[in-house]
Image (cartoon, rainbow, N blue to C red):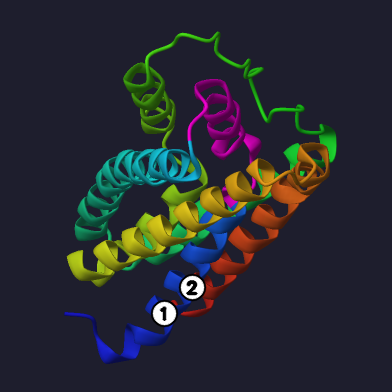
Amino acid sequence: MVDAAAQPLLFSLLASGFGVAFLHAILPTHWLPFVLVGRAQRWRVGMTMTAVVVAGLAHIVSTALVGGLIALAGLALEGWISGLLPWLSAALLFAFGLFYLIRAAVRRPALAGGPDFETPEPGVPDRTAFLGLIVLMAVSPGEVLLPLYLSSADQGLAALGALTVAFAAGTILGMGLFTALARAGASILKLERWARFEGAVLGVALIGVGLLVATRVH
């Protein structure tokens, strides 16, 4: 049960979680493979979007598993040192925020946001291509989302579940939107220009959430 006094913080974390997840989905690694594979396999829109949704859910499930372990570790430490968890959460959020700001300042994202994604050769079975996209997202948990699990660890399982739903909604909405735009003929290069700002935006957002958590510490 979520304490009434903690509800404003929880709602803020859920809103921040949705926003950060959506911004994180701007990375071409979250939508470019679906565009390329969909074209190579000659998938219809429905098939491509089904792959986006299933792979996005796999991405969030793996993120939730790692985030749950982090939350459990934080709660165990909280049992030993009372009042430490909020400060740990704020410090971790600050650290991640600074990391993304520094990374955004020193380097620009690659054209495909990471490894080059080549269009698969014709003849790849649809099942293989579909499962490949799911595995691609499942083995790469969203590290930028993990500090928010620690921030809400003391709010209970219901809060962690709600945060996971917010992550899933933001991630799948972002992945679906950018996949649809690219598939519909929007310039991929133009969309990828937004990716260069992703690190800075995420950094500022995480530091802002860290400030919110720190100011709630009594």
Residue bearing mark 2: 15
Residue 191 placement (x, y as % from top left): 76, 46
Residue 162: horizontal and vertical position, in percent? 30, 68
Q: Specify the quadrant that holds the C terminus.
A: bottom left
Observer-nearest of 40 and 102 = 40
Query: Residue type at mark 1?
Result: Phe
Which residue is at 63% across, 15% downward?
118
Real-space Cα separation, disc 1 to disc 2, in angstroms = 6 Å
82 on left or right of 122: left
Per the rendered image, the range of residues in magenta is 24-43
SS label for mark 1: helix
Q: Residue at x 33, y 90 (%)?
A: 5
- The circle on residue 148 is none
> Circle 1 sits on which residue?
11
The reply to whether the magenta stretch includes residue 26 is: yes
Horizontal side of 73 relative to 177 (left or right) equals: left
Q: Is residue 201 above or below residue 60?
A: below
Q: Is residue 198 left or right of residue 36?
A: right
